[in-house]
Image (cartoon, rainbow, N blue to C red):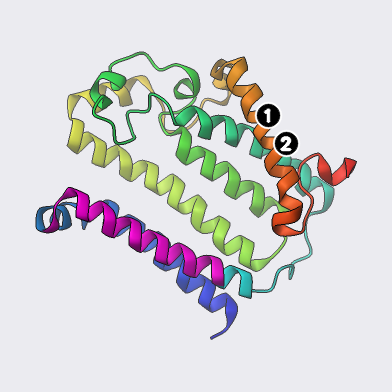
Amino acid sequence: MDPLVSLAAATAAFVGSHFAMSHPLRAPLVATVGEKPFLGLYSLVALATFAWMVAAFRAAPPADLGGSGHAGWIVASVLTLPALVLFLGSLSKNPALPDPRAETLAARDPAGVFAVTRHPMMWSFALWAVAHIALWWSVRTLIVAGAVLFLALVGAHMQDRKKRALMGAAWDGWQARTRYWPRWSALPRAGPVLWLVALALWLLVTWAHVPAAGIPAGPWLWIG
């Protein structure tokens, strides 16, 4: 099979199984096998399709597009820092995550990254995807980044529907006080500590891009 066709199939399997098992198949599967076995099955399917996608990505041509030059790298570098801010901030006090305190968390006033969007994790993935699309480096990157962008933005919308069904008025209130589309002007409200942690991690991740992918990224592209 052509490597790019294999990658497209693997990516479709990863995204499709995620949507199917997170939404239409979740309730009947949980009712049949129980919550914990379902989570195990979900993790197994996700791991298998992700491993297939990674293997297909590595087999595909690595640099078959012209690239967008320094302009693309600047865009990518700028976008990945706030992506890390959103991702790190989403890990705490997030009513969208499985948490027995979800209704209590949804009752508070949105603060930090939740003043930007109620889906900071999804938008962190979306920014990562746009950053890699902007590089215009390879078809394989466009396939994976495009899938991640679709999964993040459509997944956030579907998450609203699922959480509304699970939490009712608690999620309705949280949704009324927050935004799906980010208010980027609120990003500074994430707080200086979070920004400093994200900056340190951004420097580490972009530095690790060389041994991991063989390509310098972030400030290391220019300072070596």
Q: Are marks 1 and 2 in contact (CB under 8 Å)?
A: yes
Tell me the magenta residue range.
33-55
Residue nearer the viewer, 209 or 85: 209
**Within-10-Å neighbours for mark 1: few <14, some 14–19, many 20+:** some
Residue 199 badge: 1
As shown in the figure, which amino acid type bears the numbered disc 2? Leu
**Within-10-Å neighbours for mark 2: few <14, some 14–19, many 20+:** some
Query: Does any portion of residue 24 appear in the rendered image?
Result: no
Q: Quadrant of residue 102?
A: top left
Secondary structure state at the residue bearing disc 1:
helix
Residue nearer the viewer, 113 or 146: 113
Instruction: Tell me residue 195's x, y (percent).
Output: 63, 23
State the residue at coordinates (24%, 23%).
103
Instruction: Tell me residue 209's x, y (percent).
Output: 72, 50
Residue 49 highlighted magenta (yes or no):
yes
Question: Is 206 placed left or right of 109 in the picture?
Answer: right
